[in-house]
Image (spheres, rainbow, N blue to C red):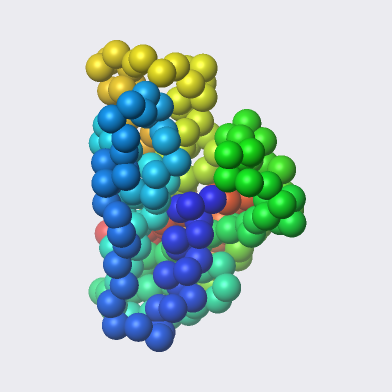
């Protein structure tokens, strides 16, 4: 949720502010010496062990936006550098429901996360970019969702062990990378068309280049 929420809010205020930042950078700022959980609910981009969380990937994706905005809607933004490179961000952020707000903070459970949000519908976004060069275009999708780029899920797969070895931490770091997919599209009539499918709380960074 946190990564998709960051993307959503950044897109919402994009044409209203000149600069935006995120604080804090690390969970260490609010960590307690007796805390043994590698995921302690802190608001940092990185865990205390420097594991990159979805919020980190959200900020990392945001920095890839180009200077020229072609389109912005509730769930996506399309930008270009004007020289044949396009970058897109999209999200399927779901808001907390009434059940979430009825619970005290100490009653929330990571095992019940899916119950705390308004719906669980997927989202399909169709893109139409006009005026592009004919020929082959390469589209790279970088995806963060339940199964990819999700450090919490990786830790849960290790039974939320408190005492992890250095090798365990390194595994979580490696397993918490976004998924990458590559798609090739042949363009005719200077119109590039494709779709992006997003699970609940998923967000994507899409990079598009023309293959010479």
7 or 32: which is nearer to us? 32
> Residue 170: percent from the left, percent from the top?
28, 23
Which quadrant of the rendered structure holds the C terminus? bottom left
> What residue sits 46% from the left and 53% below the top?
3
Is 113 displayed left or right of 27 in the figure?
right
Instruction: Examine the image and state in which quarter residue 50 appears.
Output: top left
> How many numbered discs sit on the rendered protein?
0
Residue 210 in view: no
Taking depth in this image into account, of 137 and 87 the one nearest to the observer is 87
Instruction: Please state the horizontal and vertical placement of residue 116, each as a whole percent of the image.
Output: 68, 47
- Relative to 116, does residue 166 appear above or below in the rendering? above
Left or right: where 151 falls relative to 60: right
In this rendered view, identify the residue nearer to me: 34 or 83.
34
Q: Which residue occupies the foreground of this view, 72 or 193?
A: 72
Q: Is residue 157 above or below residue 28?
A: above
Query: Which residue sits at x=36%, y=15%?
Result: 163
Residue 157 appears in the figure: yes
Name the residue at 64% across, 59% down. Answer: 95
- Quadrant in the picture for residue 107: top right
| Left or right placement of residue 27 versus residue 122 in this view | left
**Residue 193 x %, y %:** 54, 65
Determine whether 54 is above or below 19 in the image. above
Q: Residue 155's image quarter?
A: top left
State the image coordinates of residue 104 (x, y, percent, origin top left): 63, 46
For this view, does 189 lie left or right of residue 97?
Answer: left
Q: Residue at x 28, y 77 (%)?
A: 19
Looking at the image, the residue that sits furthest to the bottom is 16
């Amino acid at each position: 949720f946190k990564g998709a929420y960051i993307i959503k809010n950044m897109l919402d205020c994009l044409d209203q502010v000149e600069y935006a930042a995120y604080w804090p950078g690390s969970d260490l700022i609010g960590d307690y010496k007796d805390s043994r959980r590698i995921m302690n609910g802190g608001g940092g981009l990185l865990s205390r062990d420097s594991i990159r969380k979805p919020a980190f990937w959200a900020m990392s994706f945001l920095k890839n936006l180009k200077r020229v905005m072609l389109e912005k809607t509730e769930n996506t933004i399309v930008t270009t550098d004007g020289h044949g490179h396009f970058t897109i961000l999209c999200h399927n952020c779901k808001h907390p429901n009434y059940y979430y707000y009825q619970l005290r903070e100490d009653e929330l459970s990571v095992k019940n996360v899916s119950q705390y949000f308004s719906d669980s519908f997927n989202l399909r976004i169709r893109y139409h970019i006009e005026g592009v060069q004919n020929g082959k275009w390469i589209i790279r999708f970088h995806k963060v969702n339940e199964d990819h780029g999700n450090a919490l899920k990786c830790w849960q797969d290790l039974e939320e062990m408190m005492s992890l070895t250095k090798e365990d931490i390194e595994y979580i770091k490696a397993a918490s990378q976004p998924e990458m997919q590559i798609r090739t599209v042949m363009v005719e009539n200077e119109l590039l068309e494709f779709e992006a499918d997003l699970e609940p709380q998923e967000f994507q960074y899409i990079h598009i280049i023309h293959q010479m």
